[in-house]
């Protein structure tokens, strides 16, 4: 399995951008109730086209087929810029799955350090998916709940 970092300078990345956008939007429909993935897709496309490194994406390719993706960006939390993994998904488990995951984490670390960041957080859609990150030293820090203003019970 190979990892393709989606960079403006990579011709193959331009050809695969529609597939990345489709994966981001599908992930949103399956896992995210807040509908932010459409904005994530549009924001990544803008950052990608401008060569702005504040967003990162990689596609996982196996037998000439896209089988996974990661999308991350920079958010500010308590006034501190932090790298945040918004989405991560792998459709298959390859025979060297942990090595592939380690390569993706290494690419994320390199990206974040290159921006002068010292911490990476990951948004997990479930406790089970959150456990996936323990291998690299991630620790549980918070549960985020979301409500659209004007929807739901108000007192």
Image (cartoon, rainbow, N blue to C red):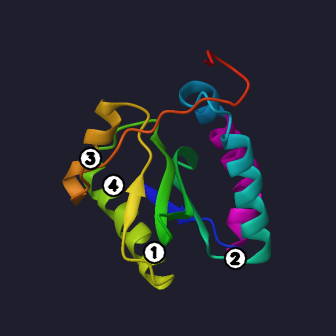
Q: Report which residue position mark 2 lands on.
A: 52
- Would you say residue 13 sits in the magenta stretch? yes
Name the quarter where the N terminus is drawn.
bottom left
Residue 140: x and y, percent?
26, 47
Query: Mark number for residue 101?
Result: 4
Of labels 4 and 2, earlier in sequence is 2
Of labels 3 and 1, earlier in sequence is 1
Front position among marks 4 and 3: 3
- Would you say residue 144 sits in the magenta stretch? no
Q: From where the camera sits, is residue 20 visible?
A: yes
Disc 3 from disc 2: Cα separation: 30 Å
Disc 2 from disc 1: Cα separation: 13 Å
First to last magenta residue range: 9-25
Of labels 4 and 1, earlier in sequence is 4
Q: Report which residue position mark 1 lands on.
A: 112
Label 2 with label 1: CB-CB less than 8 Å: no
Q: Report which residue position mark 3 lands on.
A: 140
Crowding near the residue tagged with mark 2, few <14, some 14–19, many ≥20 C-alpha atoms within 10 Å: some
């Amino acid at each position: 399995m190979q990892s393709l970092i989606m960079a403006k300078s990579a011709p193959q990345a331009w050809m695969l951008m529609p597939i990345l956008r489709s994966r981001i939007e599908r992930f949103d429909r399956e896992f995210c109730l807040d509908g932010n993935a459409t904005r994530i897709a549009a924001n990544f496309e803008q950052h990608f086209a401008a060569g702005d490194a504040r967003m990162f994406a990689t596609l996982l390719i196996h037998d000439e087929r896209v089988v996974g993706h990661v999308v991350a960006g920079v958010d500010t939390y308590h006034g501190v810029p932090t790298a945040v993994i918004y989405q991560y998904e792998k459709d298959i488990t390859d025979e060297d799955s942990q090595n592939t995951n380690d390569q993706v984490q290494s690419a994320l670390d390199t990206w974040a350090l290159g921006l002068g960041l010292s911490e990476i957080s990951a948004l997990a859609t479930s406790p089970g998916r959150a456990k996936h990150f323990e291998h690299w030293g991630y620790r549980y820090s918070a549960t985020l709940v979301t409500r659209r203003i004007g929807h739901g019970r108000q007192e």
